[in-house]
Amino acid sequence: MGLEKILSISGKPGLYELTAQTRGGFVAKSITEGKKISVSVRNNVSLLSEIAVYTYSEEVPLGTIFQKIYEKEDGGQAIDHKASKKELENYFAEVLPDYDVDRVYQSDIKKIIQWYNLLVSNGFTDFSKESDKESTEEADKTKEKVDKTKDEEE
């Protein structure tokens, strides 16, 4: 399972795994609790594979940042997302030295670190960019499902 099946749902804590599509949305399973929930297309949903962070030269995919944290921590947990603002900024600057400090807020850094720790603590450790055609097609299908469901509801 790659980041293309991991969701962040606005208004709901934690991360979710996309499991099935329904008529008016889809079914997602909480990564931490394992509970399944029905998600309407009215919810603001983000696929982690579609999120990127601004740097001064480009946008870096979230998976790449997770991989850098994973390598920095030798597969362990990152610092606590509740650390001080200065600690979080210093830590993030070690991971992504050229991140755009004007466009990447402290809340973004907190969320990235929190998500990383959540994924690692639940056994998700492969953040590398999968280059084979099959995984790319799977990511496209998942994105199409979410987009199609949103379009049908509107």
Image: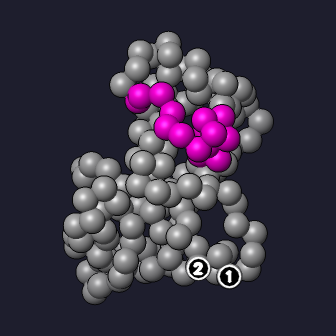
What amino acid is found at the position of numbered circle 2 in the picture?
Glu
- Please state if 65 lies on the left or on the right of 80 as rendered: right
Mark sitting on residue 109: none
Residue 59 in the image, given as x and y percentages of width and height: 68, 44
* Amino acid at circle 1: Glu
The residues colored magenta run: 65-81
Q: How many marks?
A: 2
Residue 29, located in which quarter of the rendered image? bottom left
Q: Is residue 96 above or below residue 7?
A: above
Residue 102 is situated, as x and y percent measured from the top left of the image, at 58, 23
| Residue 68 image point, x, y percent | 67, 41
Looking at the image, which residue is at 45% across and 42% down? 117
Is residue 17 shown in magenta?
no
For label 1, the SS is helix
Pointer 1 local density, CA inside 10 Å: few below 14, some 14–19, many at least 20: few
Which is nearer the eye, 110 or 128? 128
Give the residue number, with chain letter if any, for mark 1: 134
Which mark is on residue 138?
2
Callout 2 secondary element? helix
